[in-house]
Image (cartoon, rainbow, N blue to C red):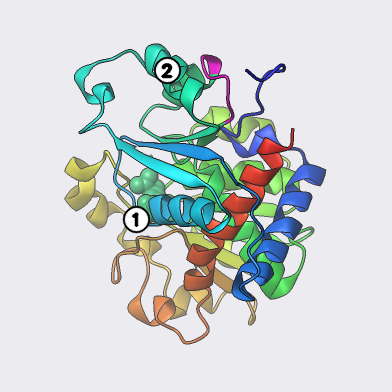
Amino acid sequence: VPSKAPRHFLTLNDVNSAELQHIIARAIELKALLRQGKAPALFDNKVLAMIFEKNSTRTRVSFESGVAKLGGHAIFLSTKDSQLGRGEPIEDAARCIASMVDMVMIRTYGHATVERFAEYSRVPVINGLTDEYHPCQLLADIQTYVEQRGSLAGKTVAWVGDGNNMCNSYIQAAELCDFELRIATPKGFEPEDEFVTPYQHRASVSNDPREAVAGADLVVTDTWASMGQEDEKKQREKIFIGYQVNKELMSYAKSDALFMHCLPAYRGKEVSADILDAPDAVVWEEAENRMHAQNALMEFLFNQ
Ligand code: CP
Ligand code: NVA
């Protein structure tokens, strides 16, 4: 039994700027080692439990493969086939699962669920996406920017589309990485005040995508209907129509601006096909970096 309280990663704010920089630098290092076929056995004898209450492609593959490549093992648990789907209290599941593994990753709906799990877990808990936050994706996005263009400090980032979990995590990233975030959403789809108000010196919110993108170094978007909002999809497609990231919108950004998307992407909706399929698109690198960034994160949390 660990003697001190475990270090969790439920939002990006669970690390400070220096720790974040360390994790990103280590992610870049681990990526190079893996590509050279020199994977260190960092997770020898370690087991990660992955709990999914929502679908996933990248999060599952990046965690499962990342842990395996570094000598550990990952267990996939979904609501459908675990007792969580039959109403076992999260606190009970947390105590049992955490007693048998070394780390837990959870993807769920309400953020309070991961907080409750973490409270009862004696091992580190990682947020693999909630309705409110997606911090692991930010690690990958920051790594990708740093690899392509260097530090984000002093840069301008435009968030176009829905004021969702990714947007909330970008707001925290703005503070930790010292960049200006300009958010443009349709009216009524702005991020909630509680996420923006503490960071007003970093993040501004408008309903004008061109104004947000003007002179930006990085333009980011995401699906218009997140998991859990399937019923609103058709209605949202009508409301969000002017918020597509395409060549016309990108022409307002800096000429060397990057485009990022956490994926899955819907071509012809939030992003035009030519932007996503451009030969120099970094979205595929961004997806791969999920694995490297999370490997660095897990090493960091194990070493606390
Ligand atoms: N970006 C991301 O989290 O992808 P998945 O939903 O496929 O895990
Ligand atoms: N905002 C999206 C991200 C998917 C990775 C969702 O929550 O569904």
Q: Quadrant of the N terminus?
A: top right
Q: Give 89 or 226, whichever is nearer the viewer.
A: 89
Q: How would you rate the neighbour count of disc 1 (Cα within 10 Å): few for under 14, some for 14-19, many for 20 or more? A: few
**Three-letter residue code for mark 2:** Cys
**Three-letter residue code for mark 1:** Thr
What whole-number distance in Å separates the C-alpha atoms at marks 2 and 1? 26 Å
Asked if one can make out residue 216 in the rendered structure from this viewpoint, the answer is: no
Q: Is residue 267 above or below residue 291?
A: below
**Mark 2 or mark 1: which is in front?**
2
Let me know if residue 300 is in the magenta part. no
Mark carried by residue 57: 1
Indicate which disc, 2 or 1, sits on the residue closer to the N terminus: 1
Tell me where residue 273 appears, x and y as whole percent: 34, 78
Q: Which residues are magenta?
A: 119-124
Mark carried by residue 96: 2
Q: Quadrant of the C terminus?
A: top right
Q: Secondary structure under badge 1?
A: loop
Farthest-out residue, bottom: 279
Quadrant in the rendering for residue 89: top left
Is residue 181 shown left or right of residue 112?
A: right
- Determine if the C-beta at disc 2 is less than 8 A from ligand 1: no
Asked if one can make out residue 115 in the rendered structure from this viewpoint, the answer is: yes
Tell me where residue 27 appears, x and y as whole percent: 67, 59
Tell me where residue 136 appears, x and y as whole percent: 54, 47
Farthest-out residue, front: 45
